[in-house]
Amino acid sequence: MASVGFKAAGSGIWKKGSGAGLQMATAAVSSHTARSKGSSCPGGSSGEDRRAECSQHRAQHQSAGHSQPLPATGRARRATEPSPAVAAPANLPVSSPSASAEGIDTKAYLWARYHEMKKLVYDLLPPGICNLLNPAAIYANNEISLGDVEIYGFDYDYTLALYSNLLHSMIFNSARDILIEQYKYPEGLRKYEYIPGFAIRGLHYDVQKSLLMKIDAFHYVQLGTAYRGLKPVSDEEVIELYGGTQHIPLYQMSDFYGKGPSIKQFMDIFSLPEMTLLSSVIDYFIMNNIEFDQVHLYKDITDAIKDVHVKGMMYKWIEKDMEKYILHGDETYAVLNRLVSHNKKLFLITNSPFSFVDKGMKHMVGKNWRDLFDMVIVQADKPNFFTDRRKPFRKLDEKGSLQWDKINKLEKGKIYKQGNLFDFLRLTGWRGSKVLYFGDHLYSDLADLMLRHGWRTGAIVPELETEIRIINTEQYMHSLTWQQALTGLLERMQMHQDAESKQVLLEWMKERQEIRSLTKNLFNPQFGSIFRTFHNPTYFSRRLIRFSDIYMASISCLLNYDVNFTFYPRRTPLQHEAPLWMDQLCTGCMKTPFLEEMVHIR
């Protein structure tokens, strides 16, 4: 069970041996830099005051029940010692463009600052700074108290039931064979197999250009993540294809549900085999010099994938070997049983058919699983269920056959098909923030509920667990921290424009790009993290933040929290609110470049 090895406490959830948390690490960074760069940080405390503050922080930290001490005091002592690096004269700003005019070797000065910053960054990563994030934690975009939630709703696929990656290979192979046998695509396609880890969720596909790519929250293509078939497309070609820019205009982008006029977004986990099949077929046509119509090809592959679901092929595979395909079923039972024992009402709204859901729930929860739910709705046709008032509810009997009686109330223990949310709200009275609904598809499951109906929403993001384990590695932590410091150094030193300084800055930019590629490849060699481009949130992240109050790797994460727990989102600084970004700390100055030169303008 996911709760083993974790404890829920009033102050949050902590992973055993994880250390004080990122805030403590940041405090250590701030303290270190303020002392080593005291002249650059106005308002600094005296040495005795700082030591008193450190003792106070350490006492608060231990009294809060955290299992690990703060970074050793030896590091704090070293921070007070003079920096061995070359420093600029006291009367000269560290980034003054007049450095060369004063007879300073700017190339040597730049490299001295570089090495000083590098040493500072690595000194400021104390033992235990890695492994801070908990893969089984719940992360909040919006403040929400579970004590106010009376009703819990769930999707089924990839929410109550998580599936193994073996399912993706089956979907890929079956859809590929449908293309060959029914759509008469070339027999040579049979040599293509599913490639685990090729695609990630949230990618966009430009139908007319046959481009699969990652787009950030500002509608820019992340260079290095555009693929035609299985081969990357050069940055130069991408920019040329979009008229000399990486930007995709809003009118071409996806609509509310991720479907634009020519660019589609793949948002659910079932789309991973679809993207891989799309890329494989295009690769075959390109490699064999076969002309094809991009629109027809996209539609054929989409229809072939849809056939796998609509014709029930996927359902049969899972029903035949549930142990092989369904993950963490015992945890699903534990979550539902715990909520019911605390007098919470439960309901299920899924697009899957009753027979499939019934067999899966019996496998995970037991033959009496329906006793846990106040309402069960199957084949709901989400997202239309949330917006279309026309489809009435229909009742199913115990064998799953349709009944014809008019539905005037929704009864516990009964199974309903289709329907719409407006009738659901009218018949149940379940409205507003007392309802919390969990789903994996940001558009089909969560968007309408959050924006149109005021329900609280929880996104299930299975990829979160893997991404957090990568973030927790020493390689990622060191690479990202140095990348941020190097970025700040580039920003601070860009006013040095003599030939030698320009060469130094070019070398730094090249190194920065190498580090960015390295950190991207840690997640996925083709497309990187589903949450970030090099520095911006992805389009997927933007939607995740917009449409979910909380998000987690699986519903089993609820087992780590009290049923009255309140989630408080961290106050993420806006750009103008953050005087202590890592790169600003490491470049040793919070002053704005050219500020002195701008004074006369004001």
Image (spheres, rainbow, N blue to C red):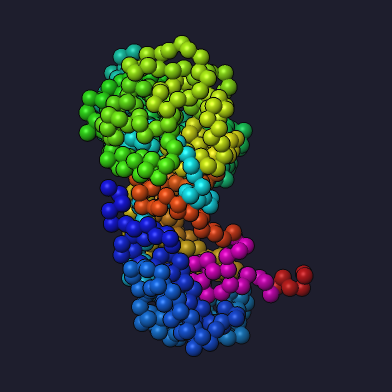
* Magenta region, residue range: 575-596
Could you tell me which residue is drawn at 33 percent across and 54 percent down?
469
Does 594 lie within the magenta span?
yes
The residue lying toward the viewer, choosing from 36 and 140, is 140
Q: Where is residue 264 in the image (x, y as percent from the top left)?
A: 50, 31
Does 353 lie within the magenta span?
no
Could you tell me which residue is drawn at 36 percent across and 22 percent down?
354
Q: Position of residue 298 (x, y in %)?
A: 44, 24
Q: In this view, does 249 lie to the left or right of 477?
A: right
Q: Quadrant of residue 224?
A: top left
Could you tell me which residue is drawn at 53 percent across and 52 percent down?
143
Q: Where is residue 265 in the image (x, y as percent from the top left)?
A: 49, 34
The quadrant of the image that shows the C terminus is: bottom right
Q: Is residue 342 left or right of residue 359?
A: right
**Is residue 143 in view?**
yes
Q: Position of residue 505 (x, y in %)?
A: 50, 65
